[in-house]
Each structure stands twice: as C-alpha cells, then as structure tokens.
Amino acid sequence: MRIDLLEKIDLIKDSRELRARKYEIDLLDLFIRYLNFEITSEELSEIYEDLSPSKIKRKNFENLDLQGIDLRILLNIASTSQDFKGIDRVEIFEKCKNQDKEKIVKIATCNNLANWNIVNKNYEEAIKITNEGIGYARKNSSIDALIYLYFSKFLACYRANKDFEESLTATKVLLANILNKDLQFLIIKKIKNILGMN
C-alpha cells in the first residue's frame, strides 16, 4: 500500500495541474504518515478534518463522490471512532464499501463492518458481509484479507450457533500457507481461545 501511495504522489507531482492536485498530495502525505505510525488515529481525524472542512459535511455526505484516498482515510477513522463530523461510522463503512472501485478498500471495509456487526451481535449480517468481502478478496488474490475474512466468518458462525467448520478449515489452510508467523500465531491463539482449547 505504501509503494502504491508513493507512486501516486510521483504521478501527481508530474502533473501540470499541481495546484489543483495539492489537496490529493496533502491527503497522500497524511495517510503515509499514519501508516508509518508518525501520527495517531486521533491526529489523523483532526488533520483530515482541517484538510477537508468544506468538502465533507453531514448534510452532503450521502451524495458525495469521494476519491479513493478520502475513503481510505475515512475507513481508518471509522475503525477507531464512533463518528466523523457527526457522520456515524456505519454510514462511513457503507460509503467505503459501495463507492470505492479499489478492491482493497472494499475488502478492508467488509472486514471492519463484519467485526462491528459481530461486536453488536448481528451475526447474520456479519456472515453476509464476510461472504461479500471473500468474493472481493478472491478476485484480488489477497491471502491476508482472506484469512481475516474467513476468521471473522468463523467467529460469526460460531457465535450464531451455525456450522463454522468450513470457515474454520479455510482459515487454518490459509494460515498454513503464509510466511507471516506472527499472524499465524495470533489467529491460532484466538481460535483456541474461542473454542476453549487452552
């Protein structure tokens, strides 16, 4: 993601309309600093609000056509805050899922929205959303995204007293095929805790 964002900055810098693209450059710079842990989630929200005071408002949010970078930032804000400028996090999640053409934002949104539904015991909705996200992740060939989504689906099915074996098996198979040992350990530990295997 960082490489992709840096490439976008280079393209914008090469543009003849540099002044018109300043907003996008500022957003990309902000998001990269956030990804590099140079600023906190709270600072991300505050700086983004300063950068977009007239663009995003409660009354126009539903009809706004936002850029991918706006949606990526809003997704991260909604993941840690209840709202942004009075716009509820679920409405932000829905905007990110339905508007963005970049599969990576749709995938991340599906995972966040599914987890929000699990926390709020809306298990059927969580299962539906994870299935949608799994479809996007398969098309995007994103193994990490598939792990998170199948794990969320397993958790939602388990909590809803539905058959969870398929999603649990898929999670374990995918984990066995990644190099990230920390992620393997973390998810396996969570599975064991959920199933009471410790």
Image: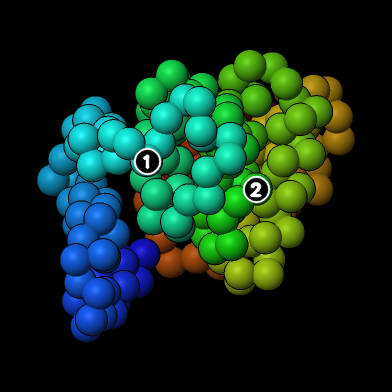
Kindly identify which residue carries mark 1.
Answer: 55
Above or below for 54 versus 20: above
Q: Secondary structure at mark 2?
A: helix
Above or below for 180 versus 130: below
Mark count: 2
Above or below for 86 versus 43: above
Image x and y of residue 166, in percent: 80, 48
Tell which of 13 and 54 is nearer to you. Answer: 54
Image x and y of residue 36, in percent: 19, 53
Tell which of 69 and 155 is nearer to you. Answer: 69
Q: Amino acid at mark 2?
A: Asn
- Residue for point 59% across, 62% down: 101
- Residue for point 31% across, 73% down: 8
For residue 102, side relative to residue 39 (left or right) = right
| Picture quadrant of residue 90 | top right
Toward the left, the furthest residue is: 38
Instruction: Indicate the quadrant containing the C terminus: top left, top right, bottom left or bottom right.
Output: top right
- Residue for point 64% across, 25% down: 118
Q: CA gap, disc 2 to disc 1?
A: 19 Å
- Residue for point 40% across, 49% down: 70
For residue 63, side relative to residue 121 (left or right) = left
Using a 10 Å C-alpha cutoff, classify the residue at mark 2 as few (fewer than 14 neighbours), some (14 to 19) or many (20 or more).
few
Q: Is residue 84 visible?
A: yes
Q: Are marks 2 and 1 in contact (CB under 8 Å)?
A: no
Kindly identify which residue carries mark 2.
Answer: 98
Q: Amino acid at mark 1?
A: Lys
For residue 14, side relative to residue 99 (left or right) = left
